[in-house]
Image: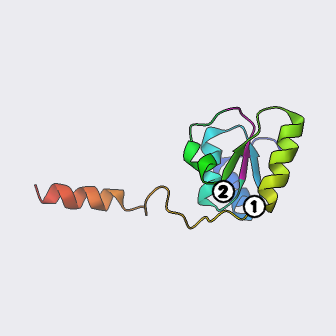
Amino acid sequence: MIDPVGYFDMIALLKRCSIVLTDSGGLQKEAFFFSSPCVTLRDQTEWVELVENGFNMLAGANQDEIINAFNSMIKSKPDFSLDLYGKGQASENIASILSKC
């Protein structure tokens, strides 16, 4: 556990971590982008595709569930090459479509 950090410090931590435990909605998705398995300390998530594809596991606030989820995710080998969110070319694709109108 650490005290809150700024955005750039968080990015540096994400680059070097083995696993993320968080109650933050945004950090769940950031963990995916940095290829880090995640345990979410909530009962639900807005990023259901991360759970469905094995990148994230919900544990709620129960100590035993958190430990079980941690042990499961630290051993997991999710395929982070899966293209869940596109290739970062949305603006180019939109501009191309609009230029043809």
Residue depicted at 62% across the width and 56% down the height? 32
Q: Earlier in the sequence, mark 2 or mark 1?
A: 2
Q: How far across and down, in percent of the image, does residue 46 sit? A: 56, 37
- Magenta-span inclusion, residue 101: no
Q: Where residue 11 is drawn, which disc sits there?
A: 2
Q: Residue furthest front?
A: 52
Q: Is residue 88 visible?
A: yes
Residue 85 in the figure: left or right of residue 8: left
* Quadrant location of the N terminus in the rendered image: top right
Secondary structure under tag 2 reads helix
Across and down, in percent, residue 25 comes to 62, 39
Q: Which segment is the magenta one?
A: 38-43
* Residue at the disc numbered 1: 76
Report if residue 41 lies within the magenta region: yes
Q: Quadrant of residue 78?
A: bottom right
Structural crowding at the residue carrying mark 1, measured as other residues with C-alpha within 10 Å and reported as few (<14), some (14–19) or many (≥20): few
Can residue 29 be seen from the camera position used here? no
Q: Image quadrant of residue 63?
A: top right
Per the model, the C-alpha gap separating discs 2 and 1 is 22 Å
Point out residue 51 in the picture as x, y percentages from the top left corner: 63, 47
The type of residue carrying mark 1 is Ser
Q: Amino acid at mark 2?
A: Ile
User: Which residue is located at x 84 percent, y 32 percent?
Assistant: 62
Q: Nearer the viewer, residue 71 or 29?
A: 71
